[in-house]
Image (cartoon, grey):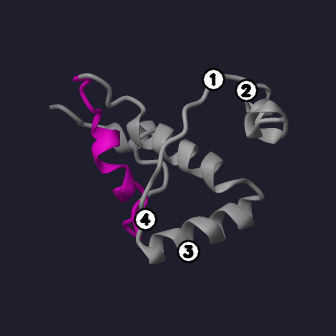
Amino acid sequence: MRHLGDSGIAREVRWYYPIPMATISLKLPDLLLEVLEKESRARGTTKSALVRECLTKSLDGHRSGEASTCYDLAHDLAGSLKGLPRDLATNPKHMDGFGQ
């Protein structure tokens, strides 16, 4: 008699990913799941891959007490104001008199 784990895709999972992976369970509100499904289809990727990418981006640089940069804290504000020079941080003419 063959056992369920003797063959099939479940037994081959260890060769599917280039690095070892653990499986977790995640509960999402319906709306967030819909957004995740829509975005994964639009990108042509799996929901799992998209969740891994988002977690990596969100947690990168915030490990074990590492200080956040100013950009980390305000990246969502970058470019949000209209009517300002586009090259404010790189054009030397905008730096005239700075720090004096």
CB of mark 3 within 8 Å of CB of mark 2?
no
Residue at image mark 3:
34
Quarter of the image where one finds residue 27: bottom left
State the CA–CA distance, disc 4 to disc 2: 26 Å
Specify which label sits upstream in the sequence, 3 or 4.
Answer: 4
CB of mark 4 within 8 Å of CB of mark 2?
no
Image spot of residue 12 (x, y percent): 80, 31
Amino acid on which the number 4 mark rests in the picture: Leu
Amino acid on which the number 3 mark rests in the picture: Glu
Specify which label sits upstream in the sequence, 3 or 1.
Answer: 1
Residue at image mark 1:
20
Specify which label sits upstream in the sequence, 3 or 2.
Answer: 2
CB of mark 3 within 8 Å of CB of mark 4?
no
Residue at coordinates 60% horizontally, 29% vertically from top-left?
21
Task: Bin the neighbour count of mark 3 within 10 Å (Cα to Cα): few under 14, some 14-19, many 20 and up.
Answer: few
State the CA–CA distance, disc 3 to disc 1: 28 Å
Residue at image mark 2:
14
Q: Is residue 50 above or below residue 41?
A: above
State the CA–CA distance, disc 1 to disc 4: 25 Å
CB of mark 3 within 8 Å of CB of mark 1?
no
Label number found at residue 28: 4
Q: Range of the magenta residues?
A: 65-84
Task: Bin the neighbour count of mark 1 within 10 Å (Cα to Cα): few under 14, some 14-19, many 20 and up.
Answer: few
Tag 2 secondary structure: helix
